[in-house]
Image (spheres, helix red, strand yellow):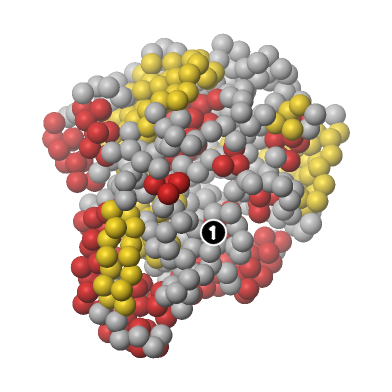
Amino acid sequence: MTTLMKPGGLSRRGLLKGAAAISAAGLILPASMGAARAQPKQGGTFRVGIGHGSTTDGYDPGLWDQLYVQTFAAARHNYLIEVAADGQLVGELAESWESDDAITWRFTIRDGVTFHSGKTLTVDDVVASLNHHRGEDSTSAVKPFLEPVVDMTTDGRTLVVTLDAPNADFPYTLSDYHLPIMPGTDGKIDTSSSDGCGGYIVQSYEPGVQATLTKNPNYWKSDRAHFDEIVLLAILDSAARLNALITNEVDLIDQVDPATIAMLESRGAANILSVSGNAHYVFPMDARVAPFSDNNVRLALKYAFDRQELVDKILSGHGSVSNDNPIGPANRYFTDDLEPKAYDPDKARFHLQQAGLDSLEVTLTAADAAFSGAVDAAVLMSEKAAGAGITITVDRAPNDAYWDNVWMKKPFCASYWGGRPVEDQMFSVAYTTGAAWNESFWSNARFDELLVAARSELDDALRSEMYREMQQIVSSEGSTIIPMYNNYVMALSKSLATPEQVGNNWNLDGFRCVERWWFA
């Protein structure tokens, strides 16, 4: 079992200027997984059982919202920039990038790349792909990421992007999974098309069920995409995923129930990867509606349960306590000394009294589709909250269509985040006022002000202070309970091999298992 530590940070100079360095970068595996150190071999059908997927999934990148579509996208698409397994930025469709002031950025686009349809990649395709997420009519979840872009022009094979203020993290933005480069026609992309320039070509796709892809014979990366075929299966039930691995119906499963790890290891049924990063499990409260509109109620709930108990019982130790902070230990500006919120019934009652309440009754909706053990976590929270005069009724929702029927619809529910490689991305997509995925509908003027200022601040010390204050605000005033950072826990068949380093920026090797891994 392997736990990966914090990736190395990039210097400001490294952010402002980068060059392509595509390789099978990156794991430090135990001796029992020595096969992972062998040279990649070609061939085979790679079957992945993923604990997400919905019948409403589609090809519009602005709407992708969970691990299934993210991994499916990584198989068929390329991005301008990739986050390597060691946390560093490397060029993908952008050979290099540079900026003298962090306002005007120049990206040199790779030559000789073709889409699955045979169309040659052009800079205009890049512009069309990015513009899909911009403008008043855009429904993209990452629209806030690109709002600072005031102009995009082309100069030969160079894309010139001008921002409204300095942003040293802008290259990280372009690695976001919502921003694949797709073929453009008349300045627009086709959101009903599977056409990409990635390592695999879609043969069939039934949303929420299965996707089958075959190797792209014209893939420009000679050291990636080792499988002949990939089959991605949506298996929402954790027990069903585990059974599929044990019976050799799949080669890899995500979100392994930590309670089953000892059994898997004792039977020698699979290799376990437990990778630490910025992922975290959350319980957002709708800040627009009572009682969650009162921060004292939110604080009462934050003090009304035992965070360590959740780490021990839900994660079986494969994670760590979070202090309602969405910025994780692998982030550059992570603040680890915020005042901890241990289980404290007296403090919970105090905040209830401050809200003018003697007791509190709320409903918490959960399903294991949110994360493995979400329902059990909700029950544990309910049991502890009773000691503080808080009644939490746990509403167990169906796994199917959880993200359509519960998330951002029920006022108090379970959710999860894979984290983001930089603070600005995490805060922008989930906590800034009006963001499409601000799942608690929280708004804080000081936070919004700091977010814009920190994005433009190139003095590292000042920037660190700003991000520290933002973390403090979210922790003490935010409308999201964040009890724990969860490791990415995966189970692999004995025949599956990986590079020496597995990425911790997202699950499944940053979604890239489909092109970085192989059969031994």
Tell me the quarter of the picture where residue 188 sits.
top right
In this view of the protein, which residue sits in the foreground, 220 or 234? 234
Residue at 42% x, 75% y: name it. Answer: 291
Viewer can see residue 309: no
Q: Is residue 473 positioned above or below 414 on the image?
A: below
Tell me the quarter of the picture where residue 115 sits.
top right
Quadrant of the frame with the C terminus: top left
Residue 259 in the image, given as x and y percentages of width and height: 19, 46
Residue hosting label 1:
438
Tell me the quarter of the picture where residue 116 sits.
top right
Could you tell whether 388 is left or right of 52 in the image? left
Viewer can see residue 436: yes
Q: Is residue 243 positioned above or below 10 on the image?
A: above
Number of other residues with Cα within 10 Å of mark 1, as a class: few under 14, some 14 to 19, many 20 or more:
many
Residue 60 in the image, given as x and y percentages of width and height: 60, 35
Could you tell whether 320 is left or right of 511 in the image? left
Residue 285 in the image, given as x and y percentages of width and height: 43, 65
> For the residue labelled by badge 1, is the local secondary structure a helix, a strand or a loop?
loop
Could you tell whether 394 is left or right of 503 in the image? left
In this view of the protein, which residue sits in the foreground, 165 or 233? 233
